[in-house]
Amino acid sequence: MSKVLVVDDEKLIVKGIKFSLEQDGMDVECAYDGEEALSMAQKCEYDVVLLDIMLPKMDGFEVCKAIREFSNMPIIMLTAKGGDMDKILGLEYGADDYITKPFNILEVKARIKAMFRRSRRGNFAEAPGEIVKNDLRMDLDARRVFIKDKEVNLTAKEFDLLELLVNNPNKVYSREQLLSIVWGYEYPGDVRTVDVHVRRLREKIEENPKEPKYVNTKWGVGYYFKA
């Protein structure tokens, strides 16, 4: 049974989401402030965390950033603000997706189920269980990444992005192609989302992010993994 943590200080919203997800067979736990959410995430590895931004005690960005220090469990941010910078900022803190309020519960369920598929099986065709490129090692089954045998904590989307590029060395993908493949056709974000994730990925796997040896830029075109 898939385990979901729903975090929002509006109890009626939480009640409605919990009821709807449980109708689809999910195990749903709830938190109503940031500190409670972080405490629960420290004790349990959830399949998805549905995390509101505007929370008492700790806001959603702080909670997301704190979770990323010990886990890559998928996080979907809920935001009542429509500005693009709020959405991008959510991704900066390590979120995998976002939904803008007011939302349709069917959209919420679709996003959660898509996250289940990506985190458990990956987004792409079957590949060998392990990929080794110089100092980089990817365990595709466990969805873990190591640099010089030291584990690197990637978010679900960062892993999906790296997996796609590694499995297609020297193939240049435009930002639009990456947004479509990794985030899906229904994703409402823009290409800056890709740039944010590439930058964060480089910071984690590259010895010198300004002179990357793995995830490279083809200026004016897009990104590729150098074989």
Image: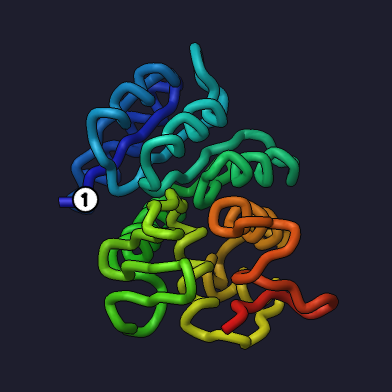
Q: Is residue 101 visible?
A: no
Q: Which residue reaches farthest left?
A: 1
Measured as percent of width and height from the top left, residue 11 is found at: 38, 22
Measured as percent of width and height from the top left, residue 4 is found at: 29, 42
Residue depicted at x 46% and y 67%: 136
Relative horizontal placement of residue 94, taking residue 72 as reference (left or right): right
Relative horizontal placement of residue 167, taking residue 210 as reference (left or right): left
For label 1, the SS is loop
Relative horizontal placement of residue 157, taking residue 47 as reference (left or right): right
Q: In the picture shown, does residue 56 fall above or below 162?
A: above
Q: Which residue is mark 1?
A: 2
Measured as percent of width and height from the top left, residue 3 is found at: 23, 44
Residue depicted at x 21% and y 50%: 2
Q: Which quadrant holds residue 13?
A: top left
Measured as percent of width and height from the top left, residue 52 is found at: 50, 32
Q: Nearer the viewer, residue 1 or 43?
A: 43
Relative horizontal placement of residue 132, taking residue 207 as reference (left or right): left
